[in-house]
Image (cartoon, coloured by chain):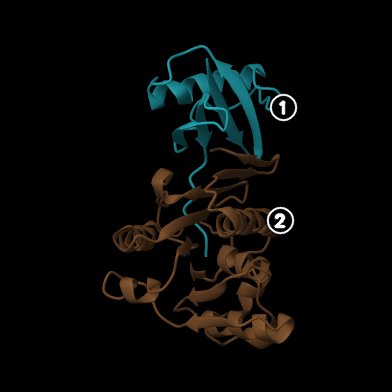
Chain colours: A cyan, B brown
Amino acid sequence: MTILNITYQGQSADYDLAMDYATSDGDIRRIAVEVVRSGGARGLHVPNLPTDAFTSYVVDRLRGPDGQPRIYLRPKVPFGA
Amino acid sequence: MRIVFCGAGALGSHALMLCRNLEADLRVVDFDRVESKNLAAQWYVKQSVGKHKAEAVRLQLANFYGVKAEGIVARLAATNAAQLLAGCELAVDCFDNADSRLVLAAAARAAGVALLHGALAADGTFGLVRWDQRFVPDREDGEGQPTCEGGEHLPIIGLTAATLARAIADFVGSALQRDYVVSLSGVASQV
């Protein structure tokens, strides 16, 4: 089991992803749209989410503190200063 | 331990202020000057306007808290990066563009200096604190993209800067290298 963490408009939520950790970035973005539209990720429910909502988002693949594979779908972070 | 902060804008200036109690020598590198618009989102005061940010932050740490820091007015580049990192065990990347982040990362790796990155989304909804071995810089979607400088995103700037300061403190205290994601839902540890 892989955890998919989605951040959208400042809200962040986890979803148990019954797919391979190596699922393509494009598929992750498509799945995330459906998850958020359906309310599958607790606390992150946007029924009318645009299909291209995550087009420019970044897919990170990391291990959580417990060693569990986690995929993070997040906005780009180009700024700091 | 000596820590160099690269970039003293929204993230860098606030992170420096929150690192003032660390058992460490602080160095800050920035070429830019404080503009009045910076007061909305960066840790500067009216008296700082017109000063170089590296000097302004050094003065504020000294005058407000009695903390000594080293301010270096310079634009970090491949030609001077090794010199700017010299003597440091930790570098903190608070730059606002991918090219500068890449130059810093190359220099830090070459010098064996630990490198922690702080980064913000343009819409003020998300921040990232991540160690170099797991960090890939993001580029802007396009030239002239809105930035965090307007001040409306100060809460996420503060939250991300505080998280950055916590990650720095953990490294100073116990060499711990933990990553964090910062959203309006809260702060989560990644690794």
On the image, the x and y values in percent for residue B30 come to 47, 76
Residue tagged by mark 1? A43
| Disc 2: which residue | B155
Q: CA distance from mark 2 to mark 1?
A: 21 Å
Q: Chain of mark 2?
A: B
Residue B132 position, x and y percent, is: 42, 50
Q: Residues within 10 Å of mark 2 (few under 14, many from 20)?
A: some
Q: Are marks 2 and 1 on the same chain?
A: no
Looking at the image, which residue is at 63% across and 79% down?
Answer: B36
From the viewer's perspective, is residue B160 above or below residue B53?
above
The residue most toward the left is B79
**Which quarter of the picture shows residue B89?**
bottom left
Relative horizontal placement of residue B149, taking residue B47 as reference (left or right):
left
Q: Secondary structure at mark 1?
A: loop
In this rendering, is residue B168 above or below B189?
below
Front residue of B81/A16: it is B81
* Residue B3 place in picture, x, y as percent: 50, 69
Residue found at x 54% / y 80%: B53
- Three-letter amino acid code at the position of disc 2: Pro
Q: Amino acid at mark 1?
A: Gly
Q: Which chain's residue wears label 1?
A: A
Q: Residue at x 48, y 55 (%)?
A: B117
At mark 2, the secondary structure is helix
Q: Position of residue B181 (x, y in %)?
A: 58, 43
Does residue A13 sit above or below B10 in this rendering? above
B181 w.r.t. B65: above or below: above
Instruction: Please indicate, yes or no, whether residue B95 appears anywhere in the rendered image.
Output: no
> Can residue B182 be seen in this snapshot?
yes
